[in-house]
Structures are given as structure tokens and as C-alpha cells.
Image: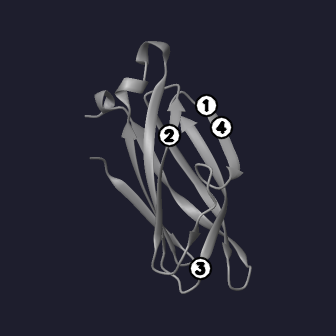
Amino acid sequence: MTDSVQQVTDGVSVTVEAFYQPKQSNPIAAEFLFAYRITIENLSTMPIKLLRRHWHIVDSNGSFREVEGDGVVGQQPVIEPGANHQYISACSLRSEIGKMRGSYLMENLYNKRLFKVAIPEFQMVAPFKQN
């Protein structure tokens, strides 16, 4: 089990857990795959819809990339008050240590207001690099 990180923005909680995937990684070829599970919980009194995601991904070798797109894993979920949406995705790194952070663009379905929700920064560390 890995540590999780959590952040709340405008009544929306985002919790992230990352997991190294040794069977899908190839350290000799500098390919390190990490899965991450995200739980988005609507703590507000309004239904919300996740429209877009924006990621900042950093490898310990200094490479940086941004990923933007509609929804998450092909979905733009509506999250009712008190409910949550959970999904699993993955990120490939060129080194055994990296980190990600980002944001979601959400829509309040009552007043159509768009707002950003922070995705807390989380570390991705292959177990053989940990003390």
C-alpha cells in the first residue's frame, strides 16, 4: 500500500494513491510505469461535472511534460453532492522517480459556473529506490 495525498478545493476533495507496476516496467530500457487511483468526492451541495484534466509530469531526469484533455479515462462524470467518482489511470516515466500534479475543470450544474479543482502533487517512486 502506498501513501495517499488529499486536497480540497471549492468543496471538492481529490485523493491520489500511486503504485509502481513492475510487470509493465523495463528498467533496462528506462521505462517505469506507475498506476494511480484518484477519488474525487463532492463535499458541496451542488452537482458537478468533470469537464477536463490538466497534468504536469516531472521525471527525476529533468524531463517535464504537460497532458491536457477532456474528462478522465474517456468519461466526463457527474458527481452528485455527497457522492464520489473513482478511477485508475497510469503514467510512464523515463526514470524511477517522478511526480505529478494538476487540475480538473469542473462545472457546477446548478449555476453553470466553471471552476478549477487542484489535484495534489504526488510522488512516483519505484520501490527499489526507497530507503
Separation of residues labelled 1 and 2 (CA atoms): 17 Å
Find numbered disc 2 in the image and state the secondary structure of the residue it sits on: strand
Q: Is residue 74 above or below residue 13?
A: above
Specify which label sits upstream in the sequence, 1 or 2.
1
- The residue labelled by disc 2 is 90
Separation of residues labelled 3 and 1 (CA atoms): 37 Å
Separation of residues labelled 4 and 3 (CA atoms): 32 Å
Mark 4 and mark 1 residues within 8 Å of each other at the beta carbon: yes
Q: Nearer the viewer, residue 120 or 112?
A: 112
Q: Nearer the viewer, mark 4 or mark 1?
A: 4
Separation of residues labelled 4 and 1 (CA atoms): 7 Å
> Residue 39 in the image: x percent, y percent?
45, 61
Q: Nearer the viewer, mark 3 or mark 1?
A: 3
- Dot 1 alpha-carbon crowd within 10 angstroms: few under 14, some 14 to 19, many 20 or more: few
Q: Quadrant of residue 53?
A: bottom right
Mark 2 and mark 3 residues within 8 Å of each other at the beta carbon: no
- Dot 3 alpha-carbon crowd within 10 angstroms: few under 14, some 14 to 19, many 20 or more: some
- The residue labelled by disc 3 is 47
Specify which label sits upstream in the sequence, 4 or 3.
3
- The residue labelled by disc 1 is 63
Kind of residue indicated by mark 4: Arg
- The residue labelled by disc 4 is 65
Kind of residue indicated by mark 1: Ser
> Residue 125 in the image: x percent, y percent?
38, 36
Kind of residue indicated by mark 3: Pro
Q: Quadrant of residue 129?
A: top left
